[in-house]
């Protein structure tokens, strides 16, 4: 039996278009080299604004416009239809982030399915993820129990972390590992930032590093 | 006779390691698709600090350390030997920038040869480019006339722009085209930022865009 390869850690924020683009490819990419992928939520609002102390990318002169252009070019190339205007103000990342953080504590694969559904509704369908009816639908679609999530949100049991506390802990853990943007990948402690780094990541997995 | 393809504009700063890495590949890459390359000096100190209003990358928490790691990983992969410590404070970019800006007004190919020599001495040999004896040697090695450069530096003719004025104008022109980092590439008004974008740039040249 071959030795199990180390998992690839994939960090993303639902409101990051490049995180969405990466979510569509990362499992296929890793599977080709017998790596599993662990998905982790993070918040670019925390990493960019608070940890790095930078302004939001869209507001940066020249770089903001370039990044928008680059995202549209990537989407065209990969046949990704974006219902959402990339230049529109971002939605609230906390609602999907908390739901996903909770889902992970229940079942990693169902959480991944839920993340795909959330990404899809936000970027392809341009729906508002801060909508409980939609969250309930997608949670059920992923095979998870919405009532159980509601109970977790409302719990007053001090030994059960709330979804908000789970997301907060995940964001802190990501920062401690050096994650500063979305998407971000770590395998064997080797960090790769950005969707454009996925070819380099693939070469790294293929070669076993260099 | 086939129609001439548009030139690929390549922007770089001598003190940018990723600019150096790109300088080693850009002409070969473009030649495969029958594009000529026009080299342009720029200053990351102007684009990053003044135009974008950002701190120097090495000083940004998490991203600074990642960028250093990424540059070393790139150099290892491409067999590039760096005599210069990537974590060391950068040298003065004005000295090589002005010399190159002047050289371009004399002869584009000789200026490119001079740029290669300057990059090589700075990054591979860890020499100080703010050294007139070295500048004189490399200028002569590139087939250019050091005395003529000295005269250009000292000119009081108001109709002859000084090398400093030439560099200043180049930096302004780069900013006006949206260039905000090193390396940066523009072909047919299509912008590509970063050495990691060279594969995408190559695909773009090969496909004629998408």
Image (cartoon, coloured by chain):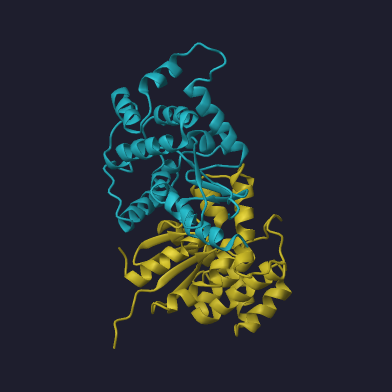
Chain colours: A yellow, B cyan
B149 relative to A165 in the view: left or right: left
Q: In the rendering, at what x and y percent does residue A120 appear?
A: 65, 72
Residue A158 or B120: which is nearer the viewer? B120
Q: In the rendering, at what x and y percent does residue A151 appear?
A: 62, 76
B13 relative to B86 in the view: left or right: right
Residue B192 or A181: which is nearer the viewer? B192
Say which quadrant the C terminus of chain A sits in.
bottom left
- Which residue occupies 33% across, 43% down? B86
Q: With respect to residue A143, does A121 lie above or below?
A: above
Q: In the rendering, at what x and y percent does residue B194 appear?
A: 48, 50
- Which residue occupies 51% across, 57% down? B33
A114 relative to B109 in the view: left or right: right
The reply to whether residue A210 is visible in this rendering is: yes
Q: With respect to residue B126, does B156 lie above or below?
A: above
Residue B52 or B21: which is nearer the viewer? B21
Question: Which residue extends farthest top?
Answer: B156
- Which residue occupies 55% across, 81% down? A110
Say which quadrant the N terminus of chain A sits in.
bottom left
Q: With respect to residue B11, does A157 lie above or below?
A: below
- Which residue occupies 47% across, 13% down? B155
Q: In the rendering, at what x and y percent does residue A134 appear?
A: 71, 74
The reply to whether residue A16 is visible in this rendering is: no
Q: With respect to residue B24, does A121 lie above or below?
A: below
């Amino acid at each position: 039996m071959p030795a199990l390869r180390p998992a690839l850690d994939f960090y993303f924020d639902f409101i990051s278009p490049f995180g969405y683009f990466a979510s569509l490819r990362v499992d296929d990419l890793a599977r080709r080299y017998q790596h599993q992928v662990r998905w982790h939520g993070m918040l670019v609002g925390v990493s960019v604004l608070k940890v790095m102390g930078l302004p939001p990318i869209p507001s940066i002169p020249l770089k903001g416009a370039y990044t928008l252009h680059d995202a549209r070019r990537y989407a065209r190339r990969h046949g990704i239809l974006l219902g959402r205007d990339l230049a529109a103000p971002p939605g609230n990342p906390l609602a999907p982030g908390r739901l996903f953080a909770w889902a992970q504590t229940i079942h990693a694969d169902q959480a991944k399915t839920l993340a795909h559904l959330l990404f899809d509704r936000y970027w392809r369908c341009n729906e508002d993820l801060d909508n409980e009816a939609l969250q309930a639908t997608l949670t059920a679609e992923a095979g998870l129990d919405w009532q159980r999530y509601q109970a977790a949100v409302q719990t007053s049991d001090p030994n059960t972390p709330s979804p908000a506390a789970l997301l907060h802990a995940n964001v802190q853990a990501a920062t401690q590992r050096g994650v500063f943007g979305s998407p971000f990948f770590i395998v064997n402690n080797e960090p790769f930032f950005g969707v454009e780094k996925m070819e380099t990541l693939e070469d790294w997995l293929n070669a076993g590093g260099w």
